[in-house]
Image (cartoon, grey):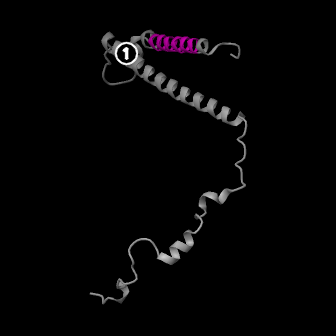
Amino acid sequence: MAGVAESNRQRIALLLIGLGMLLTLVGFALLVYSEPQDSWSGTTSRPVSPVSPEVKARAIWQLLFWLLILTFIFLVSTTAFLRWSRHFRRSLLRKPHEPTPSEDVWAMHKLPEGAVEEWTDAGPPGPDLRDRPDRRDSPEP
């Protein structure tokens, strides 16, 4: 569908999904209603009572409900996969980034001028821990 606009693609996809769900439901309904009543009575010891129309109707509604749930899960997962694959394709086809300039890579890691002399003259910043007794020297309890 290369020549079809994106909005038309979505409409066509929704139409096809709805048609598929309708055909599936009609197929299951025909299977349930076309089965002869005496086909259930095989070689059992008890006679089998025919299935009431209410039970059949409830079974069809449950089938429709689960069909809708599964179709919704399929739609969400397919949409997520298509979005991811389009993003991945764009990332593969985009122009590569320019290389990072490497003239002064270490500029942000250098100390300012005179910082080493200030530190050695004034001592390390913060409290002076040299006068504090070492924990290794204290007797163990």
Name the quarter where the N terminus is drawn: top right
Please tell me whether residue 43 belongs to the stretch shown in magenta: no
Q: Is residue 6 left or right of residue 92?
A: left
Q: Is residue 67 above or below residue 85?
A: above
The disc labelled 1 sits on which kind of residue? Trp
Rendered location of residue 120, percent (x, y): 52, 77
Residue plotted at (48% across, 10% down)? 26
Mainly helix, strand or loop, the magenta region? helix
Vertical relation: 3 (above or below) 122: above
99 and 82: which is toward the camera: 99
Residue 96 sits above or below residue 16 on the image = below
Mark 1 residue crowding within 10 angstroms, few (<14) / some (14–19) / many (20+): few
Q: Quadrant of the C terminus?
A: bottom left
Where is residue 128 shown, x and y percent of the image? 39, 78
Which structural element holds mark 1?
Answer: helix
Q: Residue at x 57, y 15 (%)?
A: 10
Image quadrant assignment for residue 127:
bottom left
| Highlighted magenta segment, given as a residue range | 10-30
Could you tell whether 30 is left or right of 82 in the image?
Answer: left
**Which residue matches tag 1?**
61
Query: How far across and down, in percent of the image, does residue 40 sit?
Result: 39, 18
Instruction: Estimate the x, y position of residue 98 in percent, counting from the top left.
Output: 72, 43
Instruction: Tell me: residue 91, above or below residue 33.
Output: below
Q: Nearer the viewer, residue 101 or 79?
A: 101
88 vs 49, left or right, is right
Q: Quadrant of residue 91?
A: top right
For the residue pair 101 and 22, the one nearer the viewer reads as 101
